[in-house]
Image (cartoon, rainbow, N blue to C red):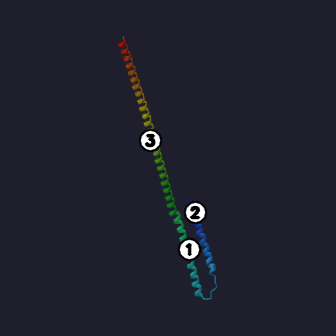
Amino acid sequence: MLNRLLMVKVWLLLIVLAKALSMNSPASAQIIQTNPQQTESFQERMRQQQEQRNQQTQQQFKETWLRQNLQEPRLQQQQIIQQQDFTRQQQELIREQQLRLQHEETRLQQQEFTQQQQLRIQQQQLRQDQQIRQQQEFRLQEQRLQQQFRQQKNKL
């Protein structure tokens, strides 16, 4: 929509310029000449200059039209592609960060699990040690009792 409006404005400007140039060139060509050949060659030069200006104006219009209708959409398309690439890269970075966080969380969970296992093993060893000590104490006590019993028996 904007391109069409801009194109209409450029056409109107081109028409106004062409009219202004065509109006100005005969006025500047109204130099009184005494020699008809000079007048004719002067008018021919003025006509050629006007034609050159018209060609330049048309060339500028073509370049403007090409830039607006061919080059700018390509640039816009390139910008869109670059934005899509940037967005894709950002999403990839986010995914990588999420994966790193998941790995770190998994590592921490494994570490916690390992620590809990080690704590259980230590507790189990403590219980076993306590049982062994209790058994040893019980044996020692039993040995003392037996020894006392023997001594008493021997005394009797």
x then y, percent, for residue 125: 41, 30
Q: Which disc, if any, is residue 122? A: none
Residue at 44% in and 36% down: 115
Q: Secondary structure at mark 1?
A: helix
Hey, which quadrant is residue 133 in on the image? top left
Rounded to the nearest angstrom, the CA distance separating label 2 from label 1 is 20 Å
Residue labelled with disc 1 = 54
Rounded to the nearest angstrom, the CA distance separating label 3 from label 2 is 62 Å
Q: What is the residue that sits farthest to the bottom in this orientation?
A: 35
Depth order, front residue of 99/137: 137
Please state if 90 lies on the left or on the right of 153 as rendered.
right
x then y, percent, for residue 105: 46, 41
Residue density around tag 1, few if under 14, some if 14–19, many if 20 or more, within 10 Å: some
Hey, which quadrant is residue 14 in on the image? bottom right
Q: Earlier in the sequence, mark 3 or mark 2?
A: 2
Residue at 39% in and 19% down: 144
Hey, which quadrant is residue 137 in on the image? top left
Depth order, front residue of 95/72: 95
Rounded to the nearest angstrom, the CA distance separating label 1 from label 3 is 77 Å
Q: Which amino acid lies under the numbered mark 2 shown in the image of this protein?
A: Leu
Q: Earlier in the sequence, mark 1 or mark 3?
A: 1
Residue at 59% in and 65% down: 9
Position of the C terminus, as image quadrant, is top left
Whether the residues at callouts 1 and 3 have beta carbons within 8 Å, the answer is: no
Residue density around tag 3, few if under 14, some if 14–19, many if 20 or more, within 10 Å: few
Residue labelled with disc 3 = 107
Q: Secondary structure at mark 3?
A: helix
Residue labelled with disc 2 = 6
Does 153 appear above or below 53? above
Q: Which amino acid lies under the numbered mark 1 shown in the image of this protein?
A: Asn
